[in-house]
Image (tube, rainbow, N blue to C red):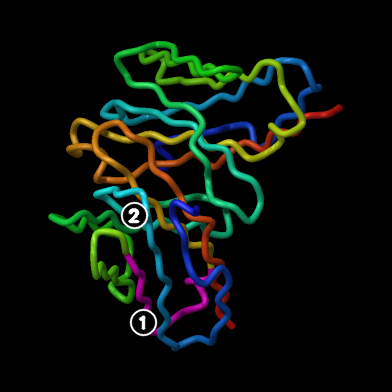
Amino acid sequence: DTAVSQTPKYLVTQMGNDKSIKCEQNLGHDTMYWYKQDSKKFLKIMFSYNNKELIINETVPNRFSPKSPDKAHLNLHINSLELGDSAVYFCASKGQGDQPQHFGDGTRLSIL
Amino acid sequence: DQQVKQNSPSLSVQEGRISILNCDYTNSMFDYFLWYKKYPAEGPTFLISISSIKDKNEDGRFTVFLNKSAKHLSLHIVPSQPGDSAVYFCAATELLYSGGGADGLTFGKGTHLIIQP
């Protein structure tokens, strides 16, 4: 019973391609997030989204776009992939108030 | 600019002893702090949290202390067990200001805890 699941776990692709990473949560949470862990191991927020509002970290290039078909899903689309996009991407979700965020196991994206 | 800092990249502790992991922050608006544990190839797993209105929170072997004036928090694990070997991330957010954490968490760089038998 995985609470937050991401697919694929590994993604290897070439520069310039467009790819998507899927995220689903079965916790009934209202808010979902995408984080990026770079080569220096920093985990940084990219987006947060609930059914009312999308908050974008201003440092995220507009080649990255989150898409939410419903409350349980927040997919990440990346256009024109660049070498610097290589990282591990984590999806997370959170309930209301001071509930902690629950994370998926990550998607390791490698750009050739 | 790192708003959450974990200055020890690694820490080695003998099994059965106390592990103390430290975290400093610079943003006075942070009002909710969390510790996550992470194994390789897995996502961070929530351990324990503390609100800025408290100075201590305890859950089994884990205790988090918050010193607001020093902008410092620490995680104590006692007794340390081999399964505690992992990377520990300190995280913070402006829960009230962001209407429930919509801004996401700001993470430190992590401390790799190694429990030696």
Please tell me how crowded label 2 is: few (under 14), some (14-19), or many (20+) other residues with Cα within 10 Å: many
User: In this view of the protein, which residue sits in the foreground, B111 or A91?
Assistant: A91
Q: Residue at x 33, y 21 (%)?
A: B51
Mark 2 sits on what residue?
A: A33
- The x, y position of residue A60, in whole percent, is 33, 64
Q: In the rendering, which numbered label is found on residue A79?
A: 1
User: In this view of the protein, which residue sits in the foreground, A99 or A57?
Assistant: A99
Q: Nearer the viewer, mark 1 or mark 2?
A: 2
Q: Which quarter of the rendered picture does the C terminus of chain B lie within?
A: top right
> Which chain is disc 2 placed on?
A
Q: Which quarter of the rendered picture does the N terminus of chain B lie within?
A: top left
Q: In the rendering, which numbered label is found on residue B6?
A: none
User: In this view of the protein, which residue sits in the foreground, A87 or B51?
Assistant: B51
Q: Relative to A52, is A22 above or below? A: below
Span of residues in magenta: A74-86
Q: Is residue B40 left or right of residue B53?
A: right
The amino acid marked with disc number 2 is Tyr
The amino acid marked with disc number 1 is Asn
- The x, y position of residue B15, in whole percent, is 80, 22
